[in-house]
Image (spheres, rainbow, N blue to C red):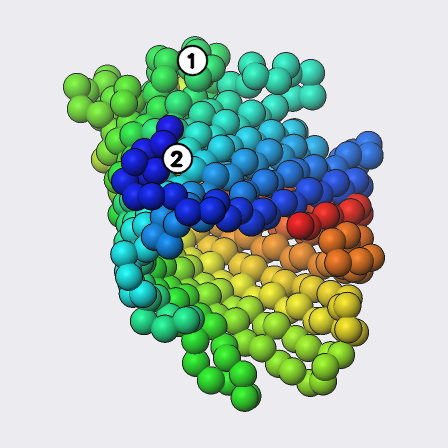
């Protein structure tokens, strides 16, 4: 349909297509809270044929599918939820119109399906937190030079937790999650991004700055009142995210190079939603609002002509909840507000077998520490480690 519409707008010349294909298969083990897994791993494939229709129009469809057999903790409902396995599949298409040497306009849409298993015996497709995410995007890009450009755009997406149906009497998720479809949202996300280069040791260092402002509207989650009742108003969240990335190249010789990345980010979430703990008959105002800061670095050493790649990185993230109170291990409330510290360390070795094949070994460590000790519902404190070895194919 996209191709037919574009061909009607301007005459097609000989269709030129370039392909990007990536496949990876990694096996290994993971350790979570001193629990050792059997042999597991991660697998994925990405396919993106870029089709140039003429001098002005091009179309880029993308297909992506992955399976993760290692445990992970994800924040889907305002706290860290542990999942045993994950499948993530998406299909997107983007049309690009090059108005002139300076301006490009892009538009497209996509669909994402994520399947999440909380327990090993859970059936794929029946997970409580499985969700689908249709999306639309429009973007304009102004290029100032080969390596400098500003982008501004708008994303609209809706998230549907298709199996979620809260049983309040059997869970501790909170009064605000009573009912079905209370996690579904409609999201508006304008953004602004700038990338450029500057001279560094006789080469070009790169940096980029990005700012997102997401308006998240819950379609069925009603705001909790101090009495524990639900009002007629619906939950509304606003999330601001800013990131800074810097990449510095070091050329010691033709056979010894280093790419050094630095990154930092900040996130602020505000919400009109509160929480009512029915078990403790306690109202917690402004329950979901938080501020988060993260900083990290990654080093990639390129050795030899092919080359070998030795990599290592460390990331630290700090989250402070504005009003969410701490609880001890049995659920009694304290006077402090919750904060959490997360540390991630990654190590990797990649050996290029030939132009397309690479053998890879990865190690990932994660620690999370918080002053919140009550973990019947969400994970705040945990350690995880995984090692994976396998092959990657690029074309």
- Assign a secondary structure to mark 1: strand
Q: Is residue 34 left or right of residue 81?
A: right
Q: Earlier in the sequence, mark 2 or mark 1?
A: 2
Residue to which mark 2 is pinned: 3
Residue 388, position as x, y percentages in the image:
77, 46
Q: Is residue 20 left or right of residue 75?
A: right
Q: Which residue is mark 1?
A: 165
Is residue 321 visible to the viewer in this orientation of the structure?
no
Marks 2 & 1, CB-CB < 8 Å contact: no
Q: Is residue 251 above or below residue 130?
A: below
Residue 245: where, in percent of width, then height?
46, 66
* Image position, residue 20 (x, y; %): 59, 48
Q: Write the residue at 28% across / 61% down.
A: 100
For label 1, count other residues whose C-alpha is less than 10 Å away and answer few (under 14), some (14-19) or many (20+): some
Q: Report the residue at 76% width, 42% height from top.
A: 26
Between the residue at mark 2 and the residue at mark 1, the CA separation in whole angstroms equals 40 Å
Q: Nearer the viewer, residue 58 or 28?
A: 58
x and y percentages locating residue 151 in the rendered image: 31, 58
Please state which of residues 365 and 394 is positioned toward the viewer in this rendering.
394
Residue at image position (62%, 35%) is 66
> Which picture quadrant has residue 184?
top left
Q: Is residue 148 above or below residue 120?
A: below
Q: Residues within 10 Å of mark 2 (few under 14, many from 20)?
A: some
In the visual, does 242 lie left or right of 247?
A: left
Numbered disc 2: secondary structure: helix
Quarter of the rendering occupied by the N terminus? top left
Q: Nearer the viewer, residue 339 or 105?
A: 105
Tell which tag, 2 or 1, sits nearer the viewer.
2
Which residue is situated farthest in the left direction here? 232
């Amino acid at each position: 349909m996209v191709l037919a519409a574009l061909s009607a707008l301007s005459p097609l010349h000989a269709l030129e297509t370039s392909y990007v294909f990536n496949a990876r298969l990694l096996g290994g083990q993971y350790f979570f809270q001193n629990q050792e897994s059997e042999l597991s791993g991660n697998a994925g494939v990405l396919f993106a044929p870029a089709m140039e229709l003429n001098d002005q129009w091009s179309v880029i469809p993308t297909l992506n599918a992955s399976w993760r057999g290692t445990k992970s903790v994800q924040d889907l409902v305002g706290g860290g939820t542990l999942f045993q396995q994950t499948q993530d599949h998406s299909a997107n298409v983007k049309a690009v119109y090059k108005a002139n040497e300076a301006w490009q306009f892009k538009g497209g849409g996509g669909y994402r399906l994520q399947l999440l298993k909380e327990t090993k015996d859970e059936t794929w497709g029946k997970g409580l937190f499985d969700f689908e995410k249709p999306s639309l995007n429009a973007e304009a890009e102004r290029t100032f030079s080969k390596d400098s450009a500003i982008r501004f755009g708008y994303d609209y997406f809706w998230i549907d937790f298709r199996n979620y149906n809260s049983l309040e009497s059997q869970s501790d998720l909170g009064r605000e999650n009573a009912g079905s479809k209370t996690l579904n949202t409609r999201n508006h996300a304008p953004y602004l991004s700038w990338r450029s280069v500057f001279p560094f040791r006789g080469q070009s260092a790169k940096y980029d700055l990005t700012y997102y402002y997401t308006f998240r509207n819950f379609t069925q989650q009603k705001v909790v009142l101090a009495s524990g009742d639900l009002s007629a108003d619906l939950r509304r969240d606003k999330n601001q995210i800013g990131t800074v990335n810097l990449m510095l190249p070091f050329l010691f010789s033709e056979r010894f190079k280093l790419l050094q990345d630095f990154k930092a980010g900040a996130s602020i979430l505000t919400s009109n939603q509160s929480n009512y703990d029915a078990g403790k008959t306690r109202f917690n105002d402004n329950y979901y609002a938080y501020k988060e800061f993260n900083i990290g670095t990654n080093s990639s050493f390129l050795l030899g002509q092919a080359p070998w790649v030795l990599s290592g990185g460390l990331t630290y993230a700090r989250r402070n909840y504005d009003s969410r109170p701490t609880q001890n291990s049995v659920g009694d409330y304290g006077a402090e507000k919750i904060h959490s510290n997360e540390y991630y360390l990654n190590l990797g070795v990649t050996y290029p077998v030939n132009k397309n094949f690479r053998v890879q070994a990865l190690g990932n460590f994660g620690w999370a520490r918080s002053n919140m000790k009550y973990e019947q519902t969400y994970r705040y404190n945990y350690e995880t480690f995984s090692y994976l070895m396998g092959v990657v194919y690029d074309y």
